[in-house]
Image (cartoon, rainbow, N blue to C red):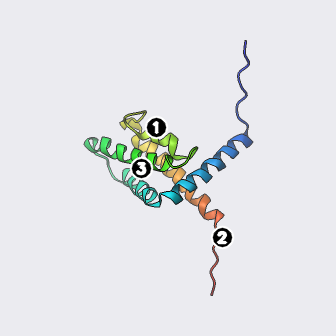
Amino acid sequence: MKDSPLPPTLEDLKKRRILALVRSEEAVHMRPQAYGRLKTQIRTVITAPVDVDAYYRRATDIAALLRELGGTVDCSIFDPFCRRIDPAKEGCARFFRMDCRDLKAHLDDLDAWRMARKRIRCVK
């Protein structure tokens, strides 16, 4: 009987997270307009009601933006969300808003991480 592989350690998970953040930052630098449109779309879904008729179009628009961002680099935070939100893949209307909130939390974390890496000083 084969032994199952060991689960990843905390250090492995931290390294994967940093790699995903670095790759996601590269994607944002390559496509800043798509990133801005994605954040706007996500904010709209979270703050305003989404009509059932508009769900499919909005979900495919967000998935297209995620594909555009995730297609530029490998191992970014955009890849899993593209599958979870796209109605042609794993996307489900019931979990759409929850997935968008989860994505927004990741985007906020990415923005905070990006700002923490920059050293901006005021010069008088």
Q: Is there any visible trace of residue 98 in the rendered image?
A: yes
Residue 10, horizontal then vertical, whole percent: 72, 40
N-terminal of the two: label 3 or label 1? Answer: 3
| Mark nearer the viewer, 2 or 3 | 3
Q: CA distance from mark 1 to mark 2?
A: 35 Å
Image quarter for residue 12? top right
Residue toward you, 111 or 25: 25
Residue beneath label 2, please? Answer: 119
> Quick check: marks 1 and 2 in contact, CB under 8 Å?
no
N-terminal of the two: label 1 or label 2? Answer: 1
**Considering the numbered disc 3 on the image, is that residue within a helix, a strand or a loop?**
helix
Residue 15, horizontal then vertical, whole percent: 70, 46
Q: How many marks?
A: 3
Q: Residue at 42% of width from left, 54% of height from top?
A: 38
Residue beneath label 3, please? Answer: 65
**Considering the numbered disc 2 on the image, is that residue within a helix, a strand or a loop?**
loop
Q: CA distance from mark 3 to mark 1?
A: 12 Å
In the rendered image, the vertical position of residue 2 relative to residue 53, given as above or below: above
Judged left or right of residue 45, residue 29 is right
Q: Residue type at mark 2?
A: Arg
Q: Residue type at mark 3?
A: Leu
Q: Residue type at mark 1?
A: Arg
Residue 98, horizontal then vertical, whole percent: 44, 43
Residue at the extreme left of the image, as rendered = 53
- Image quadrant where one finds the C terminus: bottom right
N-terminal of the two: label 2 or label 3? Answer: 3
Judged left or right of residue 39, residue 7 is right
In the rendered image, the vertical position of residue 99 relative to residue 109, given as above or below: above
Image quarter for residue 53? top left
Residue at the extreme top of the image, as rendered = 1
Residue 77, horizontal then vertical, whole percent: 55, 46
